Image: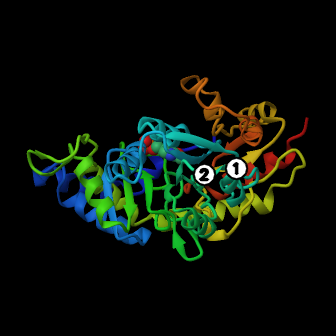
Amino acid sequence: MIQFLNLKEINQQYNQELKDACSRVIDSGWYIMGKELEAFEQEFAGYCGSKHCIGVANGLDALILTLRAWKELGRLHDGDEVIVPSNTYIASILAISENNLTPVLVDPDIHTFNLTVEGIEQAITDKTKVILPVHLYGQISPMKEIMTLAKQHDLLVLEDCAQSHGAIIDGKKAGSWGNAGAFSFYPGKNLGALGDAGAITTDDDELSEIISALRNYGSQEKYRNKYKGMNSRLDEIQAAMLRVKLQYLNSETMARQAIAKQYLDGIDNPLIELPKVTTIEGHVWHLFVLKTTKRAQLAAYFADNGIQSLIHYPIPPHKQEAYLGSLDGSFPISEKIHERVLSIPISSILTDDEIKKVIHLANEFEL
Ligand SMILES: *Cc1c(COP(=O)(O)O)cnc(C)c1O
């Protein structure tokens, strides 16, 4: 069986280094908000090309706390509109509604799965305050054009980078384009901790300071609470795990990109539509997502032949029970995407034989 994602095998590659890092934290006697977090924040800010990085408990909190901080700073108010792709993972939308802001869903480009400048422009109203592009499946959105549009309309930009660690467009990495970038280090993400973790990147000193307080009870000075904050800290053990794995992120990304290239060059079947790549270094292949109108058959066929495939995602946000009656509108592209997508394995540890088997089977698929 070719597993979709074998986390044990992925982390086994760094077994000794992870254990050493873990021992270092245990022996330090300091487990929350210490040297490991500080070092990881510096290293990840450097990696992304951002001035600041603030570690938090998970990717959802990274999104929530950024919007929350903009409210504290008076840049956002209840009811302001946030433009977000209609096909995103639910977390992007939850962060908006959690802050009493209004999600404005916009259909993406059906080939790249990302927002287009034209789509965003059409959705801008007097109440629009934020654009929240999601670099879905690992492909960065057209950030240069989005930032130009944001400037013209005086909008904030929050990048959802949970799937796009290290994706580059026009020489700049995901998370360094917008006013802020929100990252998840959930174990299955391209940079994954051994538990939950997340971070925000930004060049904005004021925003960085306020998020640092908000993640820690709204406190910059012990027992003095400037804001009604929350507890959303990235602990020392996870920071230490991430410091190990950050060193290998570029080689992991290159391995994913090489597999994607083999799939793109090798899969040729009229029943299967391959994902569209805008630039080579702009896609870090968190997922390799096919489209087919015969999804149930293709998934069953892969399973019968020992390949695990998954659907990202089966139900679009506007059809989720949690949002029934509140996310109005028709999103035909998103609905088409959710009916047709199927993700095949693309983790860095796939062997050449496994990659060839996936390609061979995809090409042999018929009705
Ligand atoms: C994973 C993910 C998140 C949330 O990250 P968690 O760490 O699981 O909270 C947010 N947005 C997108 C697009 C994601 O894929």
Question: How dense is the environment of label 2, judged by Cα within 10 Å: few (below 14), some, or many (20 and up)?
Answer: many
Neighbours of disc 1 within 10 Å: few (<14), some (14-19), many (20+): many
The answer for how far apart the CA atoms under marks 2 and 1 are is 10 Å
Q: Nearer the viewer, residue 30 or 111?
A: 111
- The answer to whether mark 2 is within 8 Å of ligand 1 is yes
Residue on which the image places disc 2:
136
User: Which residue is pictured at 26% across the width and 47% down the height?
Assistant: 214
> Which amino acid type is shown beneath numbered disc 1?
Pro
Res 243 → quadrant: bottom left
Place of residue 65 in the rendered image (x, y in percent of width and height, measured from the top left): 36, 47
Horizontal side of 349 relative to 50 (left or right) equals right
Q: Are marks 2 and 1 in contact (CB under 8 Å)?
A: yes
Q: Could you tell me which quadrant the N terminus lies in?
A: top right
Quarter containing the C terminus: top right
Above or below, comparing residue 141 to residue 83 in the picture: below
| Mark found first going from the N terminus, 2 or 1 | 1
Image check: 173 left or right of 169?
Answer: left
The residue nearer to you, when weighing 259 against 336, is 336
Query: Residue 14 vs residue 290: left or right?
Result: left
- Is residue 353 something that shows in the picture? no
Indicate which disc residue 108 carries: 1
Q: Position of residue 70 (x, y in %)?
A: 37, 52
Q: Amino acid at mark 2?
A: Leu
Where 23 falls versus 297 (above or below)? Answer: below
Instruction: Pinpoint residue 218: horizontal percent, then vertical percent.
Output: 21, 46
What is the x, y in percent for residue 10? Answer: 47, 51
Instruction: Name the residue nearer the viewer: 198 or 145.
Output: 145
Q: Residue at x 67, y 57 (%)?
A: 121
Asked whether residue 41 is in view, the answer is: yes
Residue drawn at x 37%, y 68% is 203
Residue 122 numbered tag: none
